[in-house]
Image: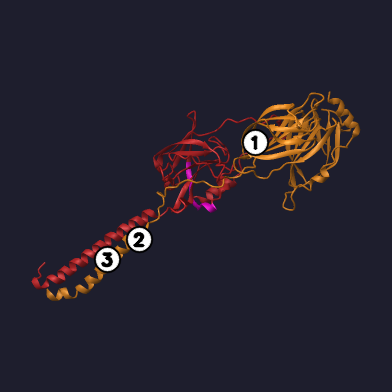
Chain colours: A red, B orange
Amino acid sequence: MTGGPDSGAPHRDRGRAALALATGVVLLSLFGIAACRARTAPDVGGPTVSALQSAPAPTTTGPGVPVSDGRPPAAGVPDSPSSLRIPALGITATVTAVGVNAATGELDVPPSVDRVGWYRYGPGMTADAGSIVIAGHVDSAEQGPGAFFRLGKLRPGDSVTLTGPRGGTRTFEVVARERYAKTAVPLDRYFARDGRPRLTLITCGGPFDRRIGHYRDNVVVTATPG
Amino acid sequence: MPILPLRRAAAAGAVALTAFAGLSAFTTGPAAAASSRVSVVHGIPGQPVDVYVNGKKTVPGFQPGKVAGPLALEEGSYDIALTKPGDDLDQALLTVEDAKVPGGADISLVAHLGADGKPVLTPFVNDTAKVGAGQARLAVRHTAAAPAVDVRAGGKPVFEDLTNPKEAKADLPAGDVTADVVLAGTDTVVLGPTDLSLKEGTATIVYAIGSADDKTLDVVAQTISGLHSAPGGVPGGSGGLADRGLSLPWYALGGTGLVLLIAGLVRLRTGRPAAPARR
């Protein structure tokens, strides 16, 4: 800089202006980065999920009228998975069999956030029809992030592996990721016991209502056997 | 044994099946599909039969205690006959002519003994309404030559004073129950106890069959599946950590940045014309 003593004031002015400009740019960039990170990935694969539901399951009826034994129904062998692994998210979670919360009528998701719950009334791990449902916490106020904290990051093609109690495995490939307001989730589609076999992973997502302590949305990932 | 009453019934002809005409009153109206699902239940001990529908042998060698079907029958009238296996139709043990089958219903047609010990064919309309998530439906039908009974689950009466040929039903939490049947108002067990696994989303229909006098009382069970509904929702978070929306401080930060940027630009602009003049 070559300015004499008389030119000091404008220089300081320009310096301040440049500083304000630079700070503004930095702050706006930070905001931009945060906004980009906050952007929720759009749904993918919705039509695939509908198609899976409407596809007929294989039928096994032969000729003639089927005659069944009139013995009282006995308890079946549970077809429960015991663990779930998603390499893309680096998670392995213990699976417990869950039913319906008698008080709320909702799925009884395991209270421990590092476990996920398999809906024991629906199709089991080796089912050849219908939707195998596994639900887990995205987080909890007391325990922090849950097993399905990053479920919404899954992309078509990612793999999900279920392991049975005796070590048998079944691997699925993600075909869809959807987000619905909880008041509008087509639950009948995700809890269907007919249609093509598929694995449905459900957690919470979207905006969080601090007043009532719940998320607005459900995040649903659908995967088909590989 | 019970073959005797069957012969008597053959002589009596088509007396039994009177309730069919009343069936259409139970089934719901115009939206119902034309075809009905009809199951046949054999509740007469000791006598295998061939089942004829409209003169066509439909269920050959049908054994007591078994359930056949469901058959898909269009709405209409049907002639139904039971013969001893291999016998001609004109030697039928039990015949019913012009049995009306309504459209869009789920029906169980039960060959059983009446309260008086004579074989009859009774149609029941099955309740196939959806059950709530986690629930199962249990229906008990008194189709035995026996007096009024109570049905108990876990020792407590759940259905009381049931008579032939009536049914009682309830939706219960899915799971295992131990049921027995006692003479109405007493603790005299006439049937059971029997373990029932009530599967979620199904209807289990239990028939009491046979004859108390002949000591042939038994149960036959029929299961209708596909009545499940989805749970009311999936609660999966209470922490708010996954709320990816931007909070207020981020917007404040962005706003401040924008103000500084504009202010800086304005200052540079206004400052710039003066600077070259001094160079």
Q: Quadrant of the N terminus of chain A?
A: bottom left
Amino acid residing under circle 2: Tyr
Residue B226 falls in image quadrant = top right
Can you identify the residue that label 3 sits on? B260
The image's mark for residue B251 is 2
Q: CA distance from mark 1 to mark 2?
A: 60 Å
Residue A115, given in percent of the width and then of the height, sits at 45, 38
**Subunit of label 2:** B
**Does A88 sit left or right of A66 as displayed?**
left
- In the image, the segment drawn in magenta is A173-184
Above/below status of B146 relative to A209:
above
**Subunit of label 1:** A
Residue B14 falls in image quadrant = top right
Label 2 element class: helix
Question: Can residue A64 be seen here?
Answer: no
Can you identify the residue that label 1 sits on? A60
